Image (cartoon, rainbow, N blue to C red):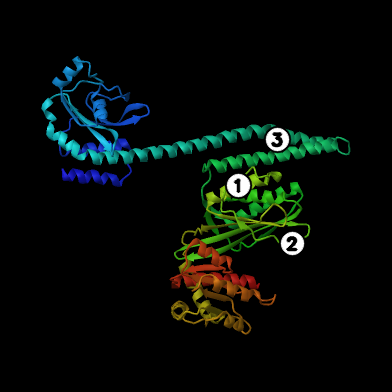
Amino acid sequence: MERALRDLAALGEGSLTLKELGREIDQILRRVMYLPNLFICLIDEEPPRIRFVYCRDEHDRHVDRPIDGKGFTDKVYLTRKSLLIQRTQSNEMLQAGQLVNHGVPSLVWLGVPLLSGERILGVMAAQDYEDAKNLRAEHEEKFMAVAALIAGLVERSARWTDRRGQIQNEQERRRQIKALFATIGHEIRSPLSVIQGFSDLLIDDLRDSPGELTAQRIAKAALELSDATDRLLDYTSAESGAADTTPVSTDLRAWSISYETWAKTAASFVGVEVEAMMTVGNPISVRLDAERLRQLLQHLMRIAFHLKGVAKVRWGLREQPVYTIPHELLRLAFYIEAQPTDLDQAPTRGESLQLAPVDLADGRTYDGTTVSLAIAERFAEMLGAEITVSAGFDTPWRATVVLTAPVVLTPGDDKGEAATSIMRAKLQQQSQRVVVVTSDEDSRTQILQYFEEAVGASPHVVSRVAELTDLLRTEPIGVVIALDESGASRVSEVHRALQNRADNFVKPYVIAVSHDQSPDGVERLLDDGADAYVPCPLNVSALIVVLSEAWLEYERRSE
């Protein structure tokens, strides 16, 4: 019996449906006792009902039924006590009207309650149609010995099954909502396209006539209704949470060009200029939900188009590598800036939305900006991105979207080996154009050891940023490695020192090395001026890869 208890306890480690659990319990109990037939049922309380979740019976199918108090299972439920009863006893109860046969009568019936504390979950029972001696008091004792453990297993499985059913039902509900609104959108767009087409014809036909202004107003209203329909469908999609797109390998340069084309086309309808400030250099692919990202940025761009006093919208992308050999991530920072006629004003940096729900009744309904912002927030949540926007809806205005995506390497593209073979000689030649900023003696020793192992040469090492400033006056430094022993202060200090140089100064590539590998810590270092991040403990492969990327970028800046 101890073996059976151990085997039953092991069932709690998996996630089984009630039917699968019943089958496993049946097989375990049959190894320790004679068990001709077995069923497990649950008791639904509202309304009171017996629901069979597992049944192995040579005669009965055991149909779910209401509790009437006149079946063997009902009596175990009502008394919360085990019941072992022979056919002779059950015949007497039948004659007295105390019993009703809900199935094929058996010669002996044994049932025990499955209790969870003071609450009865259900009943486990066995019966024999051929020999009344096959189920005796010793079988009842074994049933009672395992009843508490089986009750726990049944309760856990029932909750898991219910939860899985709820999730599946919720997913189906979301899909239905999304499909419903897609149908509504189609029904709206069909007549709307007719209105837009005929309004354009009317403008041409009524050119230079009193009716031209009316035709233009109709065309504008149709365009606004089309935008509102798009916002409605996107908001419904975002709120439903129905995943209709998946992360795929995306060429950043091609994706950016495609988005820029859309932005300029959309801007032409509202008379706003769009200027793209791209930083995507060499072709690179990342794995992300490109379609969801496009929708997010489109809604932010629509907000920028409709801000008061907007004359130009600038948008751009800055990518920054995060090296965690053998994996490589890319931090993508998209920004959208709405500029007024007076372009001397600079947009504010923005404040984090914290993905809080937007109050659609707070009065900020100017040209649908509030709805677009709510949609952008929800899409950002789906992407795992962070959104910041300027306060208010006046120009100058700025929105920033930051997310991290894994780099997709092509087959056979081992960056560590490629960098090692190509860059060792060059790094040895350029080692005196690398400066390491660290005040920690152990860090100094370690990084010098890595340089010796990687390229057979040593870089400059300084302990204070003031020494770096002095060195920049005399040496053509291309790469600065800031070992951040004290948070982001060292990187931001290096960044300020580099920015204070003359205009014709080519800014060195700044690599932050830190023990803080949290997402917030990495974001802080990159925001404070680092071009790339490498975690501690540093290793030779990571150092060579990031240095190879650093020199390529520095040479591009120097062109």
Give the residue type that dot 1 points to.
Val
The mark that comes first in sequence, 2 or 1, is 2
Q: CA distance from mark 2 to mark 1?
A: 28 Å
Q: Amino acid at mark 3?
A: Ser
What residue did someone put label 1 on? 358
Q: Quadrant of the N terminus?
A: top left
Task: Describe residue 81's horizontal placement relative to residue 168 as left or right.
Answer: left
Image coordinates of residue 394 in percent, x first then y, are 72, 53
Q: Which numbered dot is residue 345?
A: 2
| Between 306 and 550, the one nearer to me in the picture | 306
Circle 3 or circle 2, nearest the eye: 2
Residue 222: give x, y in percent of width and height.
Answer: 73, 37
Label 3 sits on a secondary structure element that is helix
Q: Nearer the viewer, residue 167 or 96?
A: 96
Label 3 vs label 1: CA separation?
Answer: 31 Å
Q: Secondary structure at mark 2?
A: loop
Q: CA distance from mark 3 to mark 2?
A: 40 Å
Q: What label does residue 29 carry, if any? A: none
Where does the image place residue 132, in percent across and percent down from the top left?
Answer: 12, 25
Residue 533 seen anywhere in this rendered image of the structure: yes
Nearest to N terminus: mark 3 or mark 1: 3
Is residue 289 visible from the viewing direction of this image? no
Where residue 551 appears, x then y in whole percent?
57, 73
Can you name the residue that lies furthest to the top here? Answer: 95
Badge 3 vs badge 1, beta-carbon distance below 8 Å? no
Residue hosting label 3: 193
Q: Nearer the viewer, residue 438 or 280?
A: 438
Give the mark, 3 or 2, whose residue is nearer the N terminus. 3
Mark 2 neighbour density, 10 Å: few (under 14) some (14–19) many (20 or more): few
Q: Residue furthest left?
A: 133
